[in-house]
Amino acid sequence: MLLRDVLTLTQAQIYSPNSGGKLAQADFERVVQSGIGADLMSDVLCYDLTHGLLITGLTNPQVVRTAEMADVTAILMIRGKVPPPETLNLAWQVGIPILGTAMTLFEVCGRLYQAGLPAARRSEELDDGGCDG
């Protein structure tokens, strides 16, 4: 799935640190290979999200730091949450687009899964007790 497909399916908008900031056309063609919906960033790190989509209701800079560590393609914030300037600035510095939708986590995950986006898989290297569950 491409990032432009995620935008369409979730009726999302793109956030930028300034009113003139826009994603380049190439950014809309970024591949999204899987997704996870979570608000516990420690849980996110238990999954392989390389080229994935992080769907969350959190808006703090820690979300961007976690996404950067997990090598995600983009972050999608739900329930109409608007990230503060420090989160947006950090995301643009590290090159991770932040999207936002008014939809709930349940609806977003359902739409994306139904459209063919698979769930992120648990990281095999962390299955030795690094993550509970």
Image (cartoon, rainbow, N blue to C red):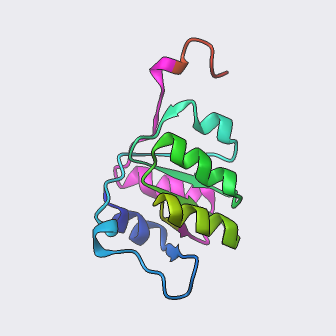
Q: Residue furthest bottom?
A: 20
* Residue 24 higher or lower than 18, as above or below: above
Q: Position of residue 7 (x, y in %)?
A: 42, 69
Task: Report the front residue among 37 and 85.
Answer: 85
* Residue 51 higher or lower than 84, as above or below: above
The image shows a total of numbered marks equal to: 0
Task: Report the front residue among 33 and 118.
Answer: 33
Left or right: 20 as drawn, with respect to 63:
left
Q: Quadrant of the N terminus?
A: bottom left
* Residue 61 higher or lower than 41, as above or below: below
Residue at x-position 48% and y-position 26%: 123
**Is residue 95 part of the magenta span, yes or no?**
no
Residue at x-position 46% and y-position 48%: 72
Residue at x-position 45% and y-position 44%: 71
Q: Position of residue 132 (x, y in %)?
A: 67, 21
Task: Report the front residue among 126 and 10.
Answer: 126
Residue at x-position 28% and y-position 64%: 29
Would residue 35 be seen by someone viewing this image from the given angle? yes
* Residue 97 higher or lower than 105, as above or below: below
Q: Residue furthest front?
A: 93
Q: Quadrant of the C terminus?
A: top right
Q: Position of residue 33 (x, y in %)?
A: 35, 46
Would residue 81 be seen by someone viewing this image from the given angle? no
**Is residue 118 part of the magenta span, yes or no?**
yes
Q: Please report the bounds of the magenta region as a residue range.
A: 99-125
